[in-house]
Amino acid sequence: MKTSTAKRGTKAKTRDSRSAKHGAKRAANPRPLDRELVLSTALAVVRDEGFDKLTMRRLAGELGVTPMAIYNYFGNQDILNQAMVDAIVGDVLDEVSRQTGSWRKRIQHMLETSLKHCREYPGMSQLFWSGGNDPWYRGKAEETMSNSLRLADLMFACLEEGGFSKKQAVYVSRTLVLLTLSAGERGNSGFEPDRFSDEEQRELATEAPHFTRHYNQYQALSDESIIRAGIGLVLDGAISAYRSDD
């Protein structure tokens, strides 16, 4: 009986310490818990530390509540992920909806803005194509997908204006989005191309002469210039290929 009483006492102390911890957090953040606070806090964790660091337990700790309190607003992390992606896409829409000019210029701005926001929230771009928020995968319009659908609609409006058929527009849009999201993940990975000294370049010239001739230009290009050129190449190639089929 003494052992059982001791265990109960230890558990009670643990609960008390957790409550005190949560209380301290809530005191530092007196705003009442609601859906928007949970969502904005989750986005802040991703922005500062990356998507892989976000868990419901970690989010609860940031808010100073128990994990169960989070589930009152988001039934599981997949639903939270969808809401985060849609909030990010909403920020993209705020910027691109005011863009004017040719259909190509509007698509270019749409994708470059999307890339900027992908890099602001490391790891989030993977969710666009994991089935969690992509309207192509889900096949239905849910409330948390409204911004994603609106952005997709804007892109297809531009491609229709450019004269692409429905099938062509799907191929072009998917290629452009994959290019953009891949660039977003690359930028967040910390990847940098190898840098070789003059002596190393001379040695490389024997093993990889073609690469060595292009090395300086390769180093000089920024990711932004590459993605901008890549978008242009995809659109030029699509126009050339599909117009020749007409």
Image: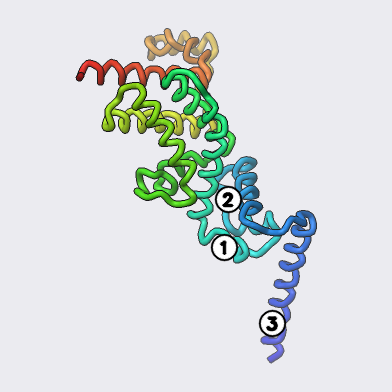
Task: Find disc 3 in the rendering and name its residue.
Answer: 8
Q: SS for tag 3?
A: helix
Quadrant for the N terminus in the image: bottom right
Disc 2 to disc 1: CB gap under 8 Å: no
Mark 1 surroundings within 10 Å by alpha-carbon count, few (fewer than 14), some (14 through 19), many (20 or more): some
Q: SS for tag 2?
A: loop
Disc 3 to disc 1: CB gap under 8 Å: no
Mark nearest the camera among 2 and 3 is 2
Q: Position of residue 215 (x, y in %)?
A: 46, 12
Count every numbered label the image shows and give the total: 3
Is 32 located above or below residue 188 in the figure? below
Q: Position of residue 95 (x, y in %)?
A: 56, 30
Task: Find disc 2 in the rendering and name its residue.
Answer: 54
Q: Position of residue 202 (x, y in %)?
A: 47, 8
- Callout 3, which amino acid? Arg
- Callout 1, which amino acid? Tyr
* Location of residue 29 (image quadrant): bottom right
Q: Upstream in the sequence, badge 2 or badge 3?
A: 3
* Location of residue 204 (image quadrant): top left
Q: SS for tag 1?
A: helix
Is 229 located above or below residue 33 in the figure? above
Is 163 located above or below residue 20 in the figure? above
In the drawing, does residue 134 fall left or right of residue 167?
right
| Residue at (79, 55) in percent of width and height | 28
Q: How far apart are labels 2 and 3 at the CA level?
A: 32 Å
Quadrant for the C terminus in the image: top left
Task: Find disc 1 in the rendering and name its residue.
Answer: 71
The answer to whether residue 194 is visible is: no
| Residue at (52, 21) in percent of width and height | 224
Q: How far apart are labels 2 and 1 at the CA level?
A: 15 Å
Mark nearest the camera among 3 and 1 is 1
